[in-house]
Structure formats: C-alpha cells, structure tokens
Amino acid sequence: MVYWKILVFIMFGIWTLGFKSAFAQSVAENIRPIGQLCVAGQTCVGAQADVPDGLMAADVTNASIESQSGALNAAESAGDSVEITPVASSSGETHEVQMRNQGSDGVMVFEPSVLSVRVGDSVTFKATDAGHNSASIEGMIPSGAESWDGGMSQDITITFTEEGTYVYQCTPHLMMAMVGVITVGDLDKNFQEVEAVAADKKSEFVMEQGRLDSYLQSLR
C-alpha cells in the first residue's frame, strides 16, 4: 500500500512538471518580440514572429534607404527653388591728404603731394591748417569725372570712379604752387592732356614753378 502511494506521488509530480513546461513555452511564444532592432556593426536584437532574421534585416535596410532617398530628393527640390543673391562688394579704401602751411615739399603743400589709388577709393582732404581748400582744376581730370570745389578750411571727401590722372589746387594759394596729383588706376588715360595743360598752368605760379612738373615726372 505504501509503495502504491509513492508511485502515484511520482506520477503526479511528472505530470505537473510537464504542464508547467508546456505553459512556459506557450507564454514565451505569445510574448516573443514582433520587431527586430538592427545597429550597424552589431548583431540584430529581437525577431519577428514567423519571419526569418535575414528577411527582416533586409526590410529594415530597404526602408532606411528609401527614407534617405526621399530626404535627398526633398533637399534637391528645395535647392532648385533657392535663388542666390550676390553680395555687393564693400566700398573702396579711404585715404587722407592733409592741407598744410609747411611740409616736406616746402610751404603751402598737400601731403602726400602725389597719391595713387584704385577705382572706387575715396580721398579725404583734411584741413590740418586753416585757410586752405581742395578744388579740381579744369582740363586736368579724366573725361567723365566729376569736378569738386571744397569750402575754405573744411574737410572734403571725394570718391574716384574714373581712371586717369587728377590735378587739384588750393584756390587761394595757387600762385604759390599749392597743387597735388592723384592717379586712379591707369594714369595714362589722360596723362598727355594733363601735361599739356600743366605747361600753361605753371605760368600762374609766382614761386615753386617746377613743383607740378616734378610731381608729374615722378609718375613716369
């Protein structure tokens, strides 16, 4: 009788273990992931039910390629509709010429007396000493260039937009040969005309009659 009870207990235990194993397997199958996470260079994690790992990885890769392709096409379309507006170049350099009673060239001078600039540059004539002005001389600036006539003892800024040679004066001190020369780009555009006018202009000088000639010769 004892042996029979032991036998029944053993059979009940075997049946119980079998039921638990089958139940665990059923639960595992029901909660198995239905997706797969793949990271480049690493093993994919998870698996879709009833889908081979290789097929799932291929689907994920194709979806990634299509997404990137769509983004690229959108970027290209946006680029086609964008108009590039050129940025205007900055203004030219600004130079300074001082109007002085005394300088390296003597009395009543512009310093520097001869200046070379580029098209688009500006020159500020600064009234360092009172009683002077800056004014262009007729026939001694390039064709198409604008003349100027600054106020007495006042600064004036001129922007040069035409190539060539410019000769200017201090009006009240022209007889003292207070003149200056500025070249813009190609000085030969009107250099011969300037030399011709200079031959007559220096007759108005009562002193330093060779000053303008020396300025022009320095450019040769």
Image (spheres, rainbow, N blue to C red):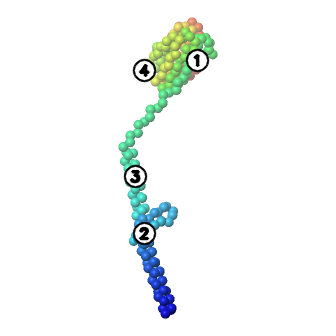
Per the image, the residue denoted by label 1 is: 111
Judging depth in this view, the residue of 47 and 145 nearest the camera is: 47
Q: Residue drawn at (51%, 64%), measured in percent from left and top?
A: 42
Between discs 3 and 1, the one toward the N terminus: 3
Helix, strand or loop under label 4: loop
Quadrant housing residue 27: bottom left
Q: Is residue 98 visible in this depiction of the protein?
A: yes
Crowd rating for badge 4 (residues with CA inside 10 Å; few <14, some 14–19, many 20+): few
Image-quadrant location for residue 143? top left
Kindly identify which residue carries mark 4. Answer: 144
**Count of marks, rendered view:** 4
Q: Which residue is mark 3?
A: 71
Disc sitting over residue 31 in the figure: 2
* Residue drawn at x 42%, y 69% as measured from the top left: 31
Q: Locate residue 57, reporting x and y percent.
A: 43, 65
Q: Amino acid at mark 3?
A: Ala
Q: Earlier in the sequence, mark 1 or mark 2?
A: 2
Q: CA distance from mark 2 to mark 3?
A: 35 Å
Q: Nearer the viewer, mark 4 or mark 3?
A: 3
Amino acid type at circle 2 is Ile
Q: Nearer the viewer, mark 3 or mark 1?
A: 3
